[in-house]
Image (cartoon, grey):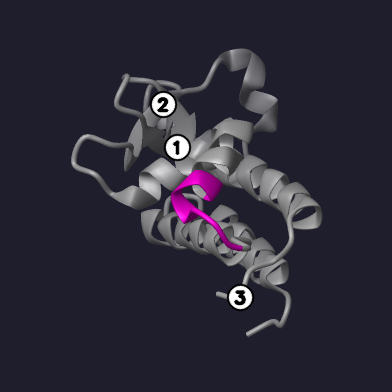
Amino acid sequence: MPADPLIQLDAAVAAARAAPLSRRRAMLAALLLDAEVDRLFAGGDILNHRATLAAASPALRLVLELCAMRPDGPALLTESVEVPLAEYDRLEVQDFMVSLYNGHTVQRVRIAAPDGTRHDVHETLALALADLRKFSIELPQGNF
């Protein structure tokens, strides 16, 4: 296990992206991000600490809500997403072939928010990690 937690987080987010349809790897990366928020806690009220970081980062807030695993909270789903023809040049060969036979759609792991919105899990994890990296520089580190 790497000594620097951010290296471990980088590896987890990269592993999730490398297996783009693995909800398990995406959830592992999300849980590690959630644990890092706690590790950065330096004292006082941990719920306030978590709320402060969540308020400063919409992506991190979504990850924290996902990790809370509330029945009425966000959930990971694998669903078909339409790919506009103008974006076909950005698809990998595998996705391109799948989309040809599935009505211009590909499977994606997404975060389904309670309000009905959908978020690409890999983009959300990357944004949350970038924000957490910024917070880790700004905050004193706790002893978790």
Residue under circle 2? 118
Per the rendering, the mark at residue 98 is 1
- How far apart, in angstroms, are the residues tagged by discs 2 and 1? 21 Å
Is 24 placed above or below 58 here?
Answer: below
Image vertical order of residue 111 relative to residue 49, above or below: above
Q: Where is 56 relative to 134, above or below?
A: above
Q: Residue at x 51, y 59 (%)?
A: 29
Label 3: which secondary element:
loop
Q: Give the crowd class for mark 3: few <14, some 14-19, many >=20 residues within 10 Å.
A: few
Q: Nearer the viewer, residue 68 or 140?
A: 140
Could you tell which of marks 1 and 3 lies nearer the N-terminus?
1
Residue kind at label 1, given as amino acid type? Val
**Image coordinates for residue 134, horizontal then vertical, percent:** 77, 48
- Which residue does the numbered mark 3 point to in the structure image? 143
Helix, strand, or loop for circle 2?
strand
Give percent across and percent down for residue 13. 60, 57
Residue 111 falls left or right of residue 20: left
Q: Which residues are magenta?
A: 43-49
Alpha-carbon span between mark 3 and mark 2: 35 Å
Report the front residue among 81 and 95.
81
Query: Considering only order in the chain, which callout, 1 or 2, is on the residue closer to the N terminus?
Result: 1
